[in-house]
Image (cartoon, grey):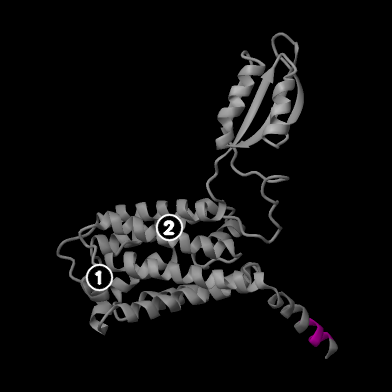
Amino acid sequence: MNKLIYRLQTACQPAAHLDWWISWGGIFLGCLILAAGFVFFINPYNIVPGGVYGASIVLHNLFPSIQVGTFGYMFDVPLLILSAILLGAKLGARTLVAALTTPFLMNVISSWAYPSQEALEKLDPQQLLGGCMDMSDHLMLTCIIGATIIGVGSGIVVRNQATTGGSDIIAMILQKYAHIRFSNAILLVDATVVSFGLVVIGFGVGSATDMSQPSWHLSFYSLIAIFVISRVLAYVINGAKEDKLLFVISDKKMVELHRFILKDLDRTATCIKSSGLYTGAEKEMLFLVVSHKEVTSVKHKIKEADPRAFVVVTDAYDTFGEGWKNLPSKDELQPE
């Protein structure tokens, strides 16, 4: 009994901190934004942005009486059970809540946004919010807006250490048992879903709607949506990756540059002893990371210190350490 009480107390401890409430609030906010992006900009136009909800949009065309969010449940619940069996408790409570909340919100928003059951089954954009959001003549715009909103919502969820499940679970299973890289597994899942959409929506195979004019071109919008979602998602999680990595090699000891880095930039760098392959002469090599705004001033200072210096400037994919981001914990989700 005492052990049970102790476990309950330990489990409830995080709830005493404001950060815990903010984090869970972020998950629900992300799910709401994600669901709204699908309902208002993706579902009515049969754009299939891969993943579980892309497959749900395709299945809704085959069975219009079942809402997209309900199909999401039909995918998510078995996948969550499968992940518990094959991956253990790797996903956690946050992902479980996010995966079940998103399709629920999608159904609630859809029922509110359409005036009748018939309009809901057709997902008719002319009846969406009384027709004030009909963007049928602007498919590229609605594709980009919808994908951006979905990317923002997904990014907020992931930043709060959760995912919406779905294709992520399939990718993790493929990674573990088929030894396919996670990014390639996601690509494989999305490609399969888009191909499914091309057959059903594009060419009208088995579709319950009138397909006298096939909409195969929607697959191109689907690919654009997938790309935009991935870029926005990465941006929301990581921010703009504008850090620059510099290698500076000189025959001189660049004291003025050292002082500039330490005093003016308030940064540090690593001095590496090096030598020329051809001459064998000793050289000084500086290794430093700066923001993109600081690159120009660093290059000017290098030119002052040694106009003949050899300089390489490249993008830093991610930067951790003092003055930058903290290294992620073992269980922290990473987008890429």
Q: State the residue at coordinates (33%, 81%).
A: 112
Q: Amino acid at mark 2?
A: Asp
For the point 62% across and 74% down, the residue is 21
What percent of the width, then of the height, locates residue 166? Answer: 49, 67
* Residue sitting at the far right: 2
Q: Nearer the viewer, residue 298 or 142?
A: 298
Give percent across and percent down for residue 78: 52, 75
Q: Is residue 104 above or below residue 140?
A: below
Q: Which residues are magenta?
A: 3-7
Decide whether residue 5 is among the magenta residues: yes
Q: Residue 211 at what x, y percent from top left?
A: 18, 66
Give the residue pinned by disc 1: 207
**Residue picked out by circle 2:** 190
Inter-mark Cα distance, 1 to 2: 20 Å
74 vs 195, left or right, is right
Q: Determine crowd level at label 2: few under 14, some 14-19, many 20+ residues with C-alpha closer than 10 A.
A: many
User: Are circles 1 and 2 on residues that touch, CB within 8 Å?
Assistant: no
Q: Please say if 98 is above or below 1.
A: above
- The quadrant of the image that shows the N terminus is bottom right
- Sequence-first disc among 1 and 2: 2
Kind of residue at disc 1 = Ser
Where, by quadrant of the figure, is residue 253 drawn?
A: top right
Is residue 82 among what the camera can see?
no
**Disc 2 on helix, strand or loop?**
helix
> Residue 1: within the magenta?
no
Q: Position of residue 263 (x, y in %)?
A: 72, 33
Q: Is 56 positioned to the left or the right of 89 in the image?
A: left
The tag on residue 309 is: none
Residue extending farthest to the top is 279
Chief SS of the magenta region: helix
Residue 145, picture quadrant: bottom left
**Residue at the farthest left position:** 212
